[in-house]
Image (tube, grey):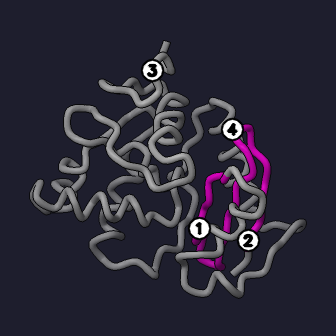
């Protein structure tokens, strides 16, 4: 496994990959070194990953360009970015596969996503847990999953629900009860 840190309009992000695809994406943290530290956590084998500065694979260079466009307010399509999430269980993989079909500017509730994978709304909590441990946020757009009633729900990335709200605002999504009053105009 290899990884790379890169600058975006929202701060320094991190991306890690294997020969099969993106293994981990890390949103920026407010403290120096935390983005890299968090990038290397939670995925088996990441502690031994090699940092790469130049000569990135073409697929990763393309993913970086799309991510930078996204954070600059453009509408990229992440569905073509290969992800390597073989370390997650079948239920979570099914959730992530369904979530990748939720496009820019669209949202889904935890309960609706549970139904899409053949479970009842009682599995909404499990969906929430899958969102909280999503190794590839934004590419697997966990920020697009809302609580019932178009409410924000949770978000485990740095900045919590304010980050989630900002990502949704980039996509033109307005929430019923925004965390950041006035953010949506």
* Residue at which label 4 appears: 69
Q: Secondary structure at mark 1?
A: strand
* Residue at which label 2 appears: 3
Label 1 and label 4: CA atoms lie apart by 19 Å
- Per the picture, the main secondary structure of the magenta-coloured stretch is strand
Q: Nearer the viewer, residue 5 or 32?
A: 32
Using the image, tell me which numbered label, if any, was put on residue 24: 1
Q: Is residue 184 left or right of residue 71?
A: left
Q: Quadrant of residue 103?
A: top left
Q: Is residue 185 above or below residue 17?
A: above
Magenta span of residues: 3-29
Q: Nearer the viewer, mark 3 or mark 1?
A: 3
Looking at the rendered structure, the number of numbered marks drawn on it comes to 4
Upstream in the sequence, badge 3 or badge 4?
A: 4
Q: Residue at x 38, y 59 (%)?
A: 131
Given contact means CB atoms under 8 Å apart, are the residues at marks 1 and 2 in contact? yes
Q: Residue at x 34, y 79 (%)?
A: 89
Label 1 and label 2: CA atoms lie apart by 9 Å
* Residue 84 coordinates in the image, percent (x, y): 53, 73
Q: Quadrant of residue 38?
A: bottom right
Q: Is residue 181 above or below residue 159?
A: above
Label 3 and label 1: CA atoms lie apart by 32 Å
Label 3 and label 4: CA atoms lie apart by 26 Å
Q: Nearer the viewer, mark 1 or mark 4?
A: 1
Per the image, is 10 magenta?
A: yes
* Residue 75 coordinates in the image, percent (x, y): 58, 33
Q: Secondary structure at mark 4?
A: helix
Q: Nearer the viewer, mark 3 or mark 2?
A: 3
């Amino acid at each position: 496994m290899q990884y790379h840190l890169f600058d975006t309009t929202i701060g320094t992000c991190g991306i890690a990959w294997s020969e099969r695809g993106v293994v981990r994406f890390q949103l920026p943290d407010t403290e120096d070194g935390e983005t890299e530290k968090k990038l290397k956590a939670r995925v088996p084998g990441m502690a031994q990953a090699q940092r790469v500065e130049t000569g990135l694979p073409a697929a990763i260079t393309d993913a970086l360009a799309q991510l930078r466009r996204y954070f600059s307010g453009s509408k990229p399509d992440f569905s073509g970015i290969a992800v390597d999430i073989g370390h997650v269980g079948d239920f979570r993989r099914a959730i992530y596969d369904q979530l990748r079909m939720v496009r820019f500017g669209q949202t889904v509730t935890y309960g609706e996503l549970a139904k899409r994978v053949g479970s009842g709304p009682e599995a909404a909590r499990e969906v929430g847990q899958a969102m909280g441990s999503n190794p590839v946020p934004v590419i697997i757009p966990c920020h697009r999953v809302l609580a019932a009633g178009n409410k924000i729900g949770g978000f485990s990335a740095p900045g919590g629900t304010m980050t989630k709200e900002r990502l949704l605002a980039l996509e033109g999504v307005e929430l019923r009860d925004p965390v950041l009053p006035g953010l949506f105009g």
